[in-house]
């Protein structure tokens, strides 16, 4: 890959939201296998794409590039033999400030100056939902120059985010459980759910009972955003964006999944186990329906009486040979604790 070809790969990495370093040879002294203007990309994992020099130069450049990515600061390297950096060397014994000198004897009389700069892509925010708050949050993020996707709940898939993205589920109770489960599968750097702590407990408890790993549930921030008290939807959007800016400034959202778990994990990890008091906990549930041929498209939540569409998103629960559907995890949880009361129609939430 030649120097300009590297730039195509760089644009693709930036589009994916992956941080990397760009190394450029700014000066060379022969003999050397590199040439002035040679470029290479180095990823955080240490993968090198392009050409920066031979077997001696490459490991050094990769090592220093990873340090550049971590620190977020560029470096100028001078690679060559120890003798070159003496009184008779390129700089007459006075190496410029800010240049990192790394003697490499296997370059013989050759030497390289390599400039390594970190490339931090534009933040990628995925807002899931169509509420006024979701639209406001997306608009605010775009004013910061962030790459922002506003996705309606039914259209959201795990493929729309990755480990460098920030995902905010703002579906206002419409299939929160299913949407959050899809978002967790993407393992984003940040994952927040808009809703009360009580609702968050129910949602996370339901997902725990579905087998979602505890360490992934602990990374969900509930409620998303800084605590500003009772606020309007515009202010909720501001509080969420403020939290994301704060986490990025602290360096907690700069890496793959797990690197940004810090702030939100403390809030959610203490919440979700509390929702697991029954064998099947969850959110608002909608509608019971007998299983078997002729299953109606719509049915009724046995707990609250709401009409729901029978299907996987309605959190089905088997009891006494029949399948019941719910509007949210809270109703499903109530039903699982005392099915007989609701089957007989003796209780309502």
Image (spheres, rainbow, N blue to C red):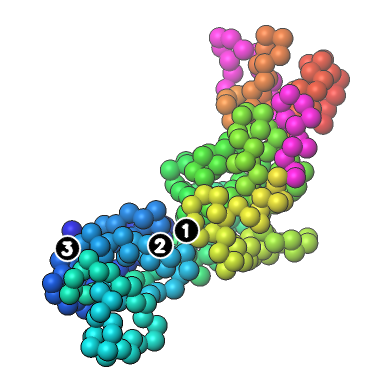
Which quarter of the figure is the C terminus placed in? Answer: top right
Q: Nearer the viewer, residue 51 or 240?
A: 51
- In primary-sequence order, the first of circles 3 and 1 is 3
Q: Residue 124 got which mark? A: 1
Q: Eyeballing the image, is 345 above or below 333?
A: above
Which quarter of the figure is the N terminus placed in? Answer: bottom left
Q: Position of residue 333 (x, y in %)?
A: 75, 28
Q: Position of residue 192 (x, y in %)?
A: 62, 51
Q: Residues within 10 Å of mark 3 (few under 14, many from 20)?
A: few
Q: Which residue is mark 3?
A: 2
- Which label lies toward us, 3 or 2? 2
> Looking at the rendering, which quadrant does residue 224 occupy?
bottom right
Check if residue 311 falls in the magenta segment.
Answer: no
Contact between labelled residues 1 and 3, with CB atoms less than 8 Å apart: no
Q: Position of residue 181 (x, y in %)?
A: 57, 38
Q: Eyeballing the image, is 319 above or below 58?
A: above
Q: Main secondary structure of the magenta part?
A: loop
Q: Residues within 10 Å of mark 1 (few under 14, many from 20)?
A: many
């Amino acid at each position: 890959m030649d120097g300009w070809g590297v730039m195509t790969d760089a644009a693709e990495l930036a589009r994916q939201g992956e941080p990397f370093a760009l190394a450029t040879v700014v000066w060379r002294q022969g003999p050397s296998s590199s040439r002035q203007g040679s470029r290479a990309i180095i990823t955080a994992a240490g993968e090198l794409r392009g050409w920066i020099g031979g077997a001696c130069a490459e490991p050094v450049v990769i090592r220093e590039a990873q340090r550049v990515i971590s620190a977020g600061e560029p470096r100028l390297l001078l690679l060559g033999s120890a003798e070159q950096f003496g009184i008779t060397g390129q700089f007459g014994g006075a190496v410029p400030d800010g240049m990192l000198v790394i003697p490499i004897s296997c370059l013989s009389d050759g030497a390289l100056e390599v400039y390594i700069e970190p490339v931090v892509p534009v933040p990628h925010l995925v807002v899931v939902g169509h509420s006024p708050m979701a639209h406001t949050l997306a608009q605010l993020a775009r004013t910061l120059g962030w790459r922002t996707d506003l996705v309606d709940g039914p259209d959201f898939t795990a493929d729309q985010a990755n480990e460098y993205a920030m995902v905010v589920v703002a579906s206002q109770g419409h299939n929160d459980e299913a949407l959050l489960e899809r978002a967790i599968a993407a393992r984003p750097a940040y994952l927040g759910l808009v809703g009360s702590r009580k609702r968050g407990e129910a949602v996370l408890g339901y997902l725990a009972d579905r087998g979602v790993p505890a360490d992934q549930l602990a990374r969900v921030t509930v409620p998303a955003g800084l605590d500003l008290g009772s606020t309007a939807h515009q202010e909720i959007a501001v509080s969420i964006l403020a939290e994301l800016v704060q986490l990025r400034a602290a360096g907690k959202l700069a890496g793959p999944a797990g690197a940004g778990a810090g702030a939100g994990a403390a809030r959610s990890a203490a919440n979700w186990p509390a929702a697991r008091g029954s064998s099947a906990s969850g959110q608002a549930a909608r509608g019971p329906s007998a299983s078997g041929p002729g299953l109606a498209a719509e049915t009724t939540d046995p707990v609250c009486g709401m009409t729901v569409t029978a299907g996987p998103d309605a959190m089905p629960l088997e009891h006494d040979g029949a399948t019941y559907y719910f509007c949210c995890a809270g109703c499903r949880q109530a039903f699982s604790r005392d099915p007989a009361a609701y089957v007989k129609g003796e209780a309502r939430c």
